[in-house]
């Protein structure tokens, strides 16, 4: 086999492997997207359960909800700080 033939064969192998890697990457991305959808559905279920428990005046659930609301408030404060930093850096 000549050097040219070997280069062509090597090039074809590289293209084939690149295509395979691209397909695998796409499939892994698909899996990730599906896992994200599953996670979101679990969150939806939790939201329904939480709403039901709130209406039943469950003190334990109420306490946890209060903690969640506190964490959400803290997140909003941090998001505001981030926006302030971004705004200051643009000037």
Image (cartoon, helix red, strand yellow):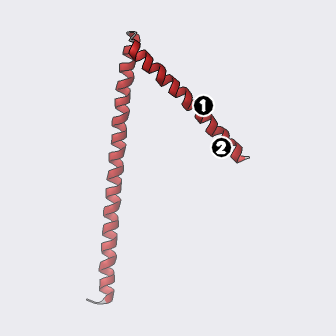
The image quarter in which residue 46 lies: top left
Q: Kindly identify which residue carries mark 2.
A: 86
* Horizontal relation, residue 84 to residue 12: left or right: right
**Horizontal and vertical percent for residue 28?**
33, 51
Q: Kindly identify which residue carries mark 1.
A: 77
- Crowd class of label 2 (few under 14; some 14 to 19; many from 20; radius 10 Å): few
**Horizontal and vertical percent for residue 32?**
35, 45
The residue depicted at 30 percent of the width and 68 percent of the height is 16
Circles 1, 2 touching at the beta carbon (< 8 Å): no
The residue depicted at 35 percent of the width and 56 percent of the height is 25
**Horizontal and vertical percent for residue 70?**
52, 24
Determine which of the numbered discs, if any, sits on residue 64 in the image: none
Image quadrant occupied by the N terminus: bottom left
In the image as oriented, which residue stretches furthest toward the bottom? 2
The image quarter in which residue 17 lies: bottom left
For label 1, the SS is helix
In the image as oriented, which residue stretches furthest toward the left? 1
Position of 70 relative to 29 (above/below)? above
Q: How many marks?
A: 2
In the image as oriented, which residue stretches furthest toward the right? 91
The one nearer the camera, 29 or 90, is: 90
**Horizontal and vertical percent for residue 79?**
59, 35
- Crowd class of label 1 (few under 14; some 14 to 19; many from 20; radius 10 Å): few
Q: Mark 1 to mark 2: distance in Å?
A: 14 Å
For label 2, the SS is helix
* Horizontal relation, residue 33 to residue 89: left or right: left
The residue depicted at 38 percent of the width and 12 percent of the height is 58
Position of 5 relative to 86 (above/below)? below
The one nearer the camera, 38 or 86, is: 86
Closer to us: mark 1 or mark 2? Answer: 1
Position of 30 relative to 19 (above/below)? above
Q: Earlier in the sequence, mark 1 or mark 2?
A: 1
């Amino acid at each position: 086999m000549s050097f040219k033939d070997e280069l062509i064969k090597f090039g074809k192998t590289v293209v084939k492997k690149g295509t395979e890697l691209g397909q695998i990457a796409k499939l892994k991305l698909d899996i990730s997207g599906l896992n994200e959808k599953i996670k979101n559905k679990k969150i939806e279920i939790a939201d329904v359960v939480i709403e039901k428990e709130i209406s039943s005046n469950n003190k334990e659930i109420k306490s946890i909800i209060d903690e969640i609301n506190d964490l959400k408030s803290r997140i909003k404060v941090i998001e505001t700080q981030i926006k302030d930093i971004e705004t200051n850096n643009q000037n």
